[in-house]
Image (cartoon, coloured by chain):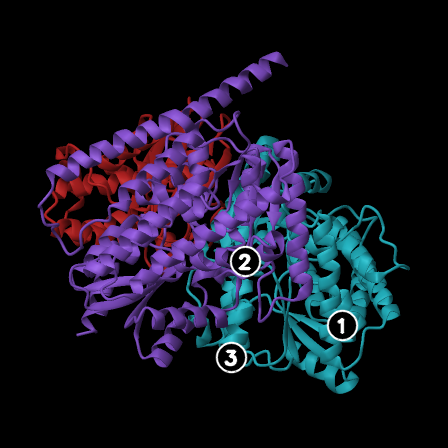
């Protein structure tokens, strides 16, 4: 017993040291290095089709590096939860959980193009390549014990919310069988038309169950005051993120939709934490400053596009450059927008009641009529003259219906729309040259 | 009995038709290899007839391959999985993992220490991971089969070809060429990519498992090397690798 | 044949009918309300019409074919459609075909809870069952009669019990696999009372005194026994299916460990039966429970090998495949993984795989 306490104590100490000392120190070193770099670079005009890089990008990198660094020391020190992106994390935060977001981690693996390597390890066990590349990357990472972030902490609790897809259910089943830890599910019924009262009630009941399970794992229950405070922070963070995105309604948009794909990380993985909100405040202010100065995300914005679905993480830069060189910018993406909408519905005055609605009514959990309405509204609000619908082999719930959506958007809004078939994580499933060829042809049709 | 012909084996593959005559020890005394004719019944009857005429008598016939049901007068009909295992076991004499890479299929067969099939895996129906994949892309690059080894052995590293879908890989390779990448490196990368696909089909192998190879692709030294490196062990090519299936068919009626 | 049957049911008996997508739904409620369920597992073969093109090719054939079938007017003989909330693809189909064209008759999505062993899930399930009954009430113009529901539950209990007895003694049944599974699958569209009569007739054919049928006994787990040519190929190779966990057949035969109270609240009884149903990844959170069940099915059945037979692009099934492979490998049981796409003919390669598997399993006993 003493041994266990001693070991726990040491893990906790290491974790606190990393969290309170090493992390901030790294931040300081990083920012000093960046200041030197930017001093050396002063006066240089940025090359290429993009506007000057965002100052906040550096801060983003620090923030996420610290998050993953803390994670390396989290297990054994604090309770660790692996959490789906659409999970009501507000319930876990007050209990000191370190939340790992496997989807965010998989996206990071995809950006670094290590998904094929990770996936091959589990394809040998019989995982099909037809499965979503996120779980393949994460399960491969678990099996190989390899990750670009150093180390992922072992979970004490698996938290799955099926409001983004049913895939998470099958994926977390497999994780539960692997780690032999409890799996807690929040299963918000898909909304056809209007959510029925007993559907709402079911989600509410599940949140109560979640409070119990999380309390048992953490050793105490969260108080309502704590949940109210986290909910306040999560709502504020979401609204700030929405303000960042909304700046792109200006012409030129002060950043690119591609930037947005990267800057989404904190609202997914650090939602409900003060540093998340501080970050978005800084980003928003920078974007407003750029708008005031007329600085665009790309240097010559001639056409404004809407992007639907997840990004092609391993070719985000390639796609952005291809477009920017021809004066096209993705000024809005339905994916980043989803994160500005869901959390705005939560309300500190009624944390659980509002979470029921917020976590049920997200875009991926609603019928296609509402998907269409959202896309059409975004296209108008951001004055888009075209849209690219990414038909993502890895994401059926997001992709089903896109062929019909394409027809409707083109007909009703009079904009040009293309469907681009690719994958969000696995470069083996997308021929980049062919994709770029199709995007180029699409852009030529604007002439 | 050595040198005394005892059985005939017929392997009707998707591209070639192989017929062997064996003795009691499994040595191949005579053989025929022809491109598979659409009229399999006539072709195999003719080939068996020719060999029997030379021998001066009829022998039992084992048939295998995708056209196995259309071999008239076959004493026994078995799938190529079982026959390859038997043929390979006859040559190796102990448990082994057999990689058979033919035109349309790639098979991984675990042969037990009794020569029986322990387990097997096959590529799914797309051409990725088969000889056809190489054939398409070599054709596109206009590299003759017998020059492949020369190119690959000259490359000091492979240029990664990430697509394994034949159609995607073809366009990826073309764009690599257009970018001015070395042909040698591309070819090496291509073989490495295919070998990885086969390795993933093979799954985790026991550390002491010896790996042998059969099928037409086994004649491609570059592929053998790439596979050895992907499986992290030496891959031995069976003698007359394209006849292993026919040998196994003959052994089954010996 | 089905179309004519559905039309006759309407004309002769005034019975309404509902097209039902896979997999799990409380058929008892439909029966109680005198509504014929006609299940739509694809149908197999090429898509019937161009509307399948509204879904990407990486969506499974079951859902693409169903879209083509419904939107092409082939299901117009029924009065409504019922979509169980099975997976992302059926979930998407339910909004695509009703909101964006293809199905203008009434429809209902039966949202069964995932992770059923939770108090919240049971409560929700009962509410959802009641909502389905209310919808059917609107469709038929008659409210649910609780006594009729009790009778329907008893009827479907009898069907499942008969099926379970037949399947458990499968090796004593002088029928080919195709004949057996065609007979069992008639329950996907026959009026349940007629289906029960047929099943009892089938049970009468059990030759308990005769020696068990010859051939290599195999177990199958998977989704749906399509293409049926698969069964012919097994037959030709000298094997037969001694136990199945196809979602469409064996996995829907509920044999409860504790009998539900059939005289009490019938919705409670239905919920209990839902809990007692065999493990399915479209409802349960426990992957290990599925592999445990498969292993025990395997042991009790005397099967000598297992075929994991999945439709391509089926996520709920595909995620379990590695665990199933591992479990049977540890048991030393031969396993064949087979992917099909509702094609009518088996490819030569698939036939070869099946034959080679049977040769391999057969050789094991010989050795």
Image spot of residue C159 (x, y percent): 80, 61
Image point (51%, 43%), residue name:
A83
Q: Above or below — where is A431 with respect to A21? A: below
Q: Quadrant of residue C295?
A: top right
Chain given the colour cyan = C
Question: Closer to us: mark 2 or mark 1?
Answer: 2
**Could you tell which of marks 3 and 1 lies nearer the N-terminus?**
3
Is residue A275 in view? yes
- For the residues tagged 3 and 1, is the chain the same? yes
Q: Nearer the viewer, residue B22 or A254?
A: A254
- For the residues tagged 2 and 1, is the chain the same? no
Image spot of residue A289 (x, y percent): 25, 55
- Specify the quadrant that holds the C terminus of chain A: bottom left
Q: Is mark 2 on a helix, strand or loop?
A: helix
The numbered disc on residue A358 is 2
Q: What element carries label 3?
A: loop
Image spot of residue C276 (x, y percent): 75, 50
Find disc 1 in the rendering and name its residue. C191
Question: Closer to us: mark 2 or mark 3?
Answer: 2
Image point (36%, 49%), residue name:
A281
Q: Quadrant of residue C73?
A: bottom right
**Label 1 is found on which chain of the structure?**
C
Find disc 3 in the rendering and name its residue. C72
**Label 3 is found on which chain of the structure?**
C
Colour in which chain A is drawn = purple
Chain given the colour red = B
**Label 2 is found on which chain of the structure?**
A
């Amino acid at each position: 017993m003493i041994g266990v306490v001693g070991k726990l104590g040491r893990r906790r100490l290491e974790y606190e040291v990393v969290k309170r000392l090493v992390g901030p120190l790294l931040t300081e070193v990083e920012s000093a290095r960046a200041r030197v770099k930017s001093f050396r670079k002063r006066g240089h005009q940025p090359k290429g089709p993009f506007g000057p890089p965002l100052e906040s990008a550096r801060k983003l990198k620090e923030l996420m590096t610290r998050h993953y660094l803390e994670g390396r020391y989290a297990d054994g020190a604090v309770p660790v939860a692996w959490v789906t992106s659409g999970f009501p994390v507000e319930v876990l935060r007050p209990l000191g959980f370190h939340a790992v977001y496997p989807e965010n981690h998989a996206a990071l693996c995809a950006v670094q193009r290590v998904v094929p390597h990770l996936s091959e390890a589990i394809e040998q066990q019989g995982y099909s390549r037809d499965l979503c590349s996120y779980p393949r990357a994460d399960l491969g990472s678990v099996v190989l014990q390899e990750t670009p972030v150093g180390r992922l902490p072992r979970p004490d609790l698996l938290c799955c919310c099926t409001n983004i897809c049913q895939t998470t259910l099958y994926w977390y089943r497999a994780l539960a069988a692997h780690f032999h830890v409890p799996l807690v599910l929040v299963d918000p019924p898909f909304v056809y038309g209007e959510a029925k009262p007993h559907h709402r009630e079911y989600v509410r009941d599940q949140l109560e169950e979640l409070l119990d399970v999380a309390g048992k794992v953490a050793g105490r229950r969260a108080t309502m005051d704590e949940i109210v405070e986290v909910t306040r922070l999560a709502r504020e963070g979401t609204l700030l993120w929405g303000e960042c995105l909304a700046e792109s309604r200006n012409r030129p948009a002060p950043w690119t939709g591609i930037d947005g794909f990267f800057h989404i990380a904190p609202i997914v993985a650090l939602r409900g934490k003060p540093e998340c909100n501080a970050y978005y405040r800084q980003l928003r202010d920078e974007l407003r400053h750029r708008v005031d100065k007329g600085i665009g995300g790309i240097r010559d914005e001639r056409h404004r596009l809407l992007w639907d679905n997840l990004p092609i993480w391993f070719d985000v830069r390639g796609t952005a450059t291809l477009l920017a060189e021809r004066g096209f910018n993705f000024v809005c993406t339905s994916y980043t927008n989803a994160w500005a909408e869901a959390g705005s519905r939560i309300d500190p005055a009624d944390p659980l009641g509002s979470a029921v609605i917020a976590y049920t009514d997200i875009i991926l959990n609603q019928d296609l009529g509402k998907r269409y309405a959202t896309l059409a509204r975004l296209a108008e609000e951001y004055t888009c003259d075209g849209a690219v619908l990414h038909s993502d082999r890895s994401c059926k719930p997001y992709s089903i219906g896109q062929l019909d959506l394409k027809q409707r958007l083109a007909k009703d809004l009079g904009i040009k729309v293309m469907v681009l078939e690719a994958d969000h994580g696995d470069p083996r499933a997308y021929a980049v040259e062919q994709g770029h060829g199709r995007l180029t042809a699409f852009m030529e049709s604007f002439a | 009995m050595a040198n005394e012909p005892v059985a005939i084996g017929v392997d009707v593959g998707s591209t070639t038709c192989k017929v062997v005559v064996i003795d009691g020890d499994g040595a191949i005394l005579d053989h025929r290899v022809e491109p598979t004719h659409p009229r399999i019944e006539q072709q195999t009857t003719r080939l068996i007839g020719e060999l029997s005429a030379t021998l001066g008598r009829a022998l039992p016939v084992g048939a295998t391959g995708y056209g196995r049901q259309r071999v008239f007068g076959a004493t026994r009909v078995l799938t190529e999985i079982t026959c390859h295992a038997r043929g390979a076991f006859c040559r190796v004499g102990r448990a082994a993992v057999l990689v058979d890479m033919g035109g349309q299929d790639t098979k991984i067969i675990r042969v037990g220490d009794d020569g029986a099939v322990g387990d097997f895996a096959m590529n799914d129906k797309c051409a990725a991971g088969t000889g056809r994949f190489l054939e398409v892309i070599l054709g596109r690059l206009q590299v003759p089969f017998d020059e492949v080894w020369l190119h690959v052995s000259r490359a000091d590293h492979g240029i990664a070809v990430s697509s394994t879908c034949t159609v995607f890989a073809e366009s990826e390779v073309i764009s690599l060429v257009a970018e001015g990448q070395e042909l040698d490196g591309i070819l090496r990368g291509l073989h490495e990519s295919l070998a990885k696909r086969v390795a993933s089909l093979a799954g985790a192998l026991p550390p002491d498992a010896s790996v042998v190879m059969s099928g037409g692709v086994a004649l491609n030294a570059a592929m053998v090397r790439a596979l050895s490196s992907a499986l992290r062990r030496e891959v031995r090519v069976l003698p007359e690798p394209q006849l292993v299936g026919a040998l196994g068919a003959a052994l089954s009626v010996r | 044949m089905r179309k004519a049957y559905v039309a006759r049911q309407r004309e002769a008996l005034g019975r309404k009918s509902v097209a039902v997508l896979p997999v799990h739904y409380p058929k008892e409620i439909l029966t109680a309300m005198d509504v014929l369920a006609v299940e739509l597992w694809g149908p197999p073969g090429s898509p019937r019409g161009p509307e399948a093109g509204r879904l990407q090719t990486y969506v499974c054939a079951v859902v693409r074919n169903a879209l083509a079938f419904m939107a092409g007017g082939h299901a117009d003989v029924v009065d409504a459609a019922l979509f169980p909330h099975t997976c992302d693809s059926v979930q998407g189909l339910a909004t695509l075909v009703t909101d964006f064209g293809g199905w203008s008759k009434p429809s209902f999505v039966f949202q069964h809870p995932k992770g059923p062993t939770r108090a919240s899930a049971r409560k929700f399930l009962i509410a959802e069952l009641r909502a389905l009954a209310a919808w059917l009430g609107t469709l038929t113009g008659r409210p649910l009669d609780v006594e009729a529901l009790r009778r329907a539950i008893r009827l479907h209990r009898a069907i499942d019990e008969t099926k379970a007895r037949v399947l458990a003694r499968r090796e004593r049944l002088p029928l080919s696999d195709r004949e057996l599974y065609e007979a069992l699958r008639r329950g996907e569209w026959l009026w349940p009372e007629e289906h029960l009569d047929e099943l009892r007739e089938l049970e009468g054919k059990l030759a308990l005194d005769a020696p068990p049928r010859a051939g290599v006994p195999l177990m199958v787990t998977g989704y749906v026994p399509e293409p049926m040519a698969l069964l012919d190929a097994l037959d030709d190779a000298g094997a037969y299916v001694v136990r199945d966990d196809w979602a469409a057949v064996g996995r829907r035969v509920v044999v409860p460990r504790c009998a539900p109270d059939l005289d009490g609240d019938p919705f409670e009884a239905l919920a209990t039966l839902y809990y007692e149903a065999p493990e399915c990844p479209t409802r349960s959170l426990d992957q290990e429970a599925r592999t445990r069940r498969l292993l025990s099915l395997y042991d009790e059945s005397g099967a000598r090998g297992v075929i994991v037979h999945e439709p391509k692009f089926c996520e709920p099934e595909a995620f379990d495949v590695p665990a199933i492979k591992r479990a049977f490998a540890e048991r030393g049981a031969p396993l064949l993984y087979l992917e099909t796409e509702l094609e009518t003919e088996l490819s030569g390669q698939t036939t070869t795989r099946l034959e080679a598997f049977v040769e391999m399993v057969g050789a094991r006993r010989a050795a």
